Image (cartoon, rainbow, N blue to C red):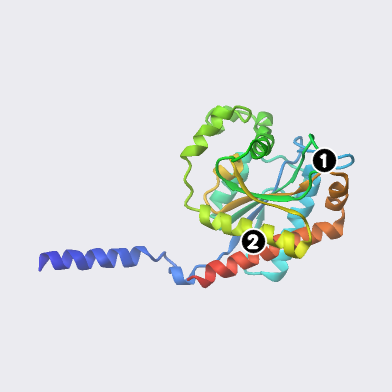
């Protein structure tokens, strides 16, 4: 009899553990943090006439605006809404402290070795699988050299040292599957709805993604080193198309996740 009671209580424990305070079946994606990469003294990469920090901010604000309009139940939080310079750990802390359901970081790419390279890339946290992915991660992570007391905040991480990225091999994210689903949605929207060239979903060791405690992606919206793409990325209508693609990817992700309840 005693053994039967133990089994019953154990089973009930598993059942109750499968529900949070609101009940899993009631779970909703209610809060998203949109991160405009770089800002302030950190201009990011640049093209012939524009800066990454400005384009990233415009697309981030437009994305949030569309979400507010069509998904009013979702709270949008920006890591920056102006030309300020939040550190990478402050961006991640903002998302963590607000218990966000999702983190999207928006950037522009660069390929100084070739002016013909163009297209979108969406990254999830993981080990780089090519030198090209590693170069992107190094460039985006190098912003910590502009931050005060970076060694303490990033545990001595050196963005230019391949050895430093070994720590990411120990990283096993509980959010990897959801991050991948969202990233695939984004690239699918860019390719099939926005009409941009998709270079696919990739993985690399981005500090801002590593520090977040929710599904997180980093979007490279295009190459400022490509003359045509730089022109497109500075066009307000094209920015709206890109933001709309990100919105639709998020909406589909939200609907899919909530339908699984």
Residue visible at 59% across and 41% down in the picture: 129
Q: CA distance from mark 1 to mark 2?
A: 25 Å
Asked if the residue at tag 2 contacts the one at tag 1, i.e. Cβ–Cβ closer than 8 Å, the answer is: no
Depth order, front residue of 157/28: 157
Please say whether residue 100 is visible from this viewpoint. no
Residue visible at 88% across and 44% down in the picture: 227
How far across and down, in percent of the image, does residue 47 sit? Answer: 85, 40
Q: Is residue 109 left or right of residue 25?
A: right
Tell which circle, 1 or 2, labels the residue nearer the N-terminal end. Answer: 2
Q: Assess disc 2: are there few (<14), some (14-19) or many (≥20) residues with their C-alpha within 10 Å of its C-alpha.
A: many
Residue furthest toward the left? 1
Depth order, front residue of 216/54: 216
Depth order, front residue of 138/151: 138
Vertical placement of 48 versus 192: above or below? above
How far across and down, in percent of the image, does residue 69 sit? Answer: 72, 69
Depth order, front residue of 196/165: 196
Vertical placement of 183 versus 208: above or below? below
Q: Is residue 1 left or right of residue 114?
A: left
Residue visible at 53% across and 69% down in the picture: 258
Dot 1: what SS? loop
Q: Which of the numbered marks, if any, corresponds to residue 193?
A: none
Q: Which residue is mark 1?
A: 225
Dot 2: what SS? helix
How far across and down, in percent of the image, does residue 210 sit? Answer: 55, 43
Quadrant in the picture for residue 85: top right
Vertical placement of 67 versus 102: above or below? below
Name the image quarter holding the N terminus. bottom left
Q: Which residue is mark 2?
A: 185
How far across and down, in percent of the image, does residue 44 sit? Answer: 76, 38
């Amino acid at each position: 009899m005693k053994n039967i009671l133990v089994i019953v209580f154990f089973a009930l424990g598993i059942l109750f553990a499968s529900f949070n305070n609101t009940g899993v079946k009631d779970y909703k994606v209610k809060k998203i943090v949109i991160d405009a990469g770089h800002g302030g003294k950190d201009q990011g990469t640049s093209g012939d006439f524009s800066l990454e920090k400005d384009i990233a901010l415009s697309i981030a604000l437009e994305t949030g605006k569309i979400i507010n309009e069509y998904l009013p139940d979702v709270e949008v939080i920006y890591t920056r809404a102006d030309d300020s310079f939040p550190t990478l750990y402050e961006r991640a802390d903002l998302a963590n402290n607000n218990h966000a359901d999702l983190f999207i970081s928006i950037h522009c790419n660069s390929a100084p070795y070739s002016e013909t390279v163009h297209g979108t890339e969406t990254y999830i946290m993981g080990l780089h699988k090519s030198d090209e992915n590693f170069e992107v991660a190094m460039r985006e992570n190098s912003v910590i050299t502009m931050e005060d007391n970076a060694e303490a905040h990033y545990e001595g991480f050196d963005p230019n040292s391949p050895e430093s990225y070994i720590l990411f091999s120990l990283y096993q994210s509980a959010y990897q599957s959801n991050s991948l689903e969202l990233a695939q949605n984004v690239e699918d929207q860019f390719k099939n709805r926005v009409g941009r060239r998709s270079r696919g979903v990739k993985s690399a060791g981005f500090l801002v993604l590593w520090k977040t405690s929710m599904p997180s992606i980093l979007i490279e919206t295009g190459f400022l080193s490509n003359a045509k793409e730089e022109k497109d990325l500075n066009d307000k209508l094209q920015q709206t198309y890109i933001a709309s693609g990100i919105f639709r990817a998020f909406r589909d992700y939200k609907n899919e996740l909530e339908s699984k309840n």
